[in-house]
Image: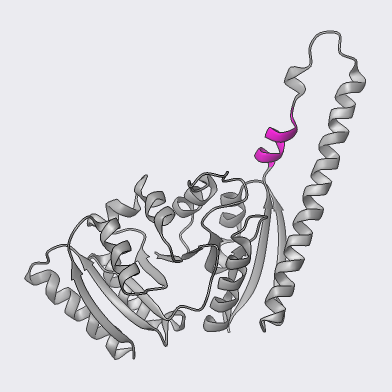
């Protein structure tokens, strides 16, 4: 078993169950330990409870004491609720065959909590929208900060998860893209699935040779590979290919030196993940 662990971030959102299931799948495929993490945000708690600035002249000191007691009660409830969510996730994992899932509760911000244990993480699993993301179709800022702030691979789930059967690997020919192919070929996570190697653009001879080399690397690892060269805007072309070919997982590198790099760095990162209808695995 690898010493590093699969870490799943759990909250009260509708994505938490899928994140749990995806982490269980990854832990089994990678023969890794599994940990669930729940973070109680001080900023969120303060925003909900800190009304001391509204207290005007003449207010009795006992009101401040009551506010402090109220903050304490809410913090206690938040801890208890988080403990319940972690317990439910651990039980779900045990029912799926994971013997000893670990649970961790932290205070602070998610990216800080993950950064503190990043050396232990083999893969991080998180839902694409958190509990505080609101009712619109936007991603929470927590996810954006995590993507930019950590260097471990991240599996971002939709509201449901099932074991992938057809994986779209976005390949751009960059050094990062070639590293992605090496990682995909070596990883049990992507074993026993049909791999769709997709390049967006009009490749020159050098790029075609790189595509052929990537395909050969995946085949040598035993993958059933379909190679496709498609045109159009990168994001929409990848999503269209995913839908038309029934791919149930998208895999791409976080950084490169091509149009896919520009897609994944900056505001387009959120657009790509937000519009994804299947989980997205971001490698480093």
Render colour scheme: one colour
From this viewpoint, which residue is outermost toward the left? 205
The residue located at (18%, 70%) in the rendering is: 229
The residue located at (86%, 23%) in the rendering is: 64
Closest to the observer, 215 or 15:
15
The region drawn magenta spans: 42-50
* Magenta stretch holds residue 103: no
Q: Is residue 61 above or below residue 12?
A: above
Q: Could you tell whether 201 is left or right of 107 in the image?
A: left
Q: Position of residue 29 (x, y in %)?
A: 52, 83
Closest to the observer, 70 or 107:
70
Where, quadrant-wise, is the C terminus in this rendering? Answer: bottom left
Magenta residues: mostly which secondary structure? Answer: helix
Q: Could you tell whether 283 is left or right of 75 in the image?
A: left
Closest to the observer, 227 or 3:
227
Q: Is residue 71 above or below residue 88?
A: above
The residue located at (45%, 60%) in the rendering is: 151
Where, quadrant-wise, is the N terminus in this rendering? Answer: bottom right
Q: How many marks?
A: 0
Q: Is residue 279 above or below residue 70?
A: below
Q: Could you tell whether 50 is left or right of 248 in the image?
A: right
Q: Position of residue 270 (x, y in %)?
A: 41, 50
* Magenta stretch holds residue 45: yes
From this viewpoint, which residue is outermost toward the front? 244
Q: Position of residue 6 (x, y in %)?
A: 58, 71
From this viewpoint, which residue is outermost toward the top? 57
Q: Position of residue 34 (x, y in %)?
A: 63, 73
Q: Is residue 57 above or below residue 213?
A: above
The quarter of the picture where residue 66 lies is top right
């Amino acid at each position: 078993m690898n010493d590093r662990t699969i870490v799943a971030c759990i909250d009260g959102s509708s994505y938490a169950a899928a994140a749990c299931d995806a982490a269980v799948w990854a832990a089994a495929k990678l023969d890794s330990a599994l940990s669930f993490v729940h973070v109680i945000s001080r900023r969120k708690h303060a925003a909900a409870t800190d009304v001391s600035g509204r207290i005007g002249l003449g207010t009795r000191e006992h009101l401040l004491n009551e506010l402090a007691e109220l903050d304490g009660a809410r913090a206690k409830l938040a801890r208890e609720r988080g403990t319940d969510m972690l317990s439910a996730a651990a039980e779900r994992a045990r029912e799926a065959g994971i013997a000893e899932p670990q649970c961790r509760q932290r205070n602070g911000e998610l990216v800080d909590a993950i950064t503190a244990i990043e050396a232990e993480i083999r893969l991080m699993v998180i839902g694409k929208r958190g509990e505080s993301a609101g009712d619109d179709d936007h991603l929470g800022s927590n996810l954006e900060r995590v993507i930019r702030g950590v260097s471990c691979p991240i599996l971002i789930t939709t509201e449901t998860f099932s074991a992938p059967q057809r994986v779209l690997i976005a390949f751009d020919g960059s050094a990062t893209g070639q590293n992605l192919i090496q990682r995909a070929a070596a990883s049990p996570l992507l074993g026993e699935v049909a791999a769709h190697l997709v390049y967006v653009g009009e490749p020159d001879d050098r790029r075609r040779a790189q595509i052929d080399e990537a395909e050969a690397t995946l085949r040598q690892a035993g993958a059933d590979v379909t190679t496709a060269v498609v045109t159009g805007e990168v994001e929409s072309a990848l999503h269209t290919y995913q839908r038309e070919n029934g791919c149930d997982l998208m895999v791409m590198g976080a950084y490169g030196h091509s149009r896919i790099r520009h897609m994944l760095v900056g505001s387009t990162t959120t657009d790509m993940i937000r519009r994804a209808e299947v989980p997205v695995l971001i490698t480093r």
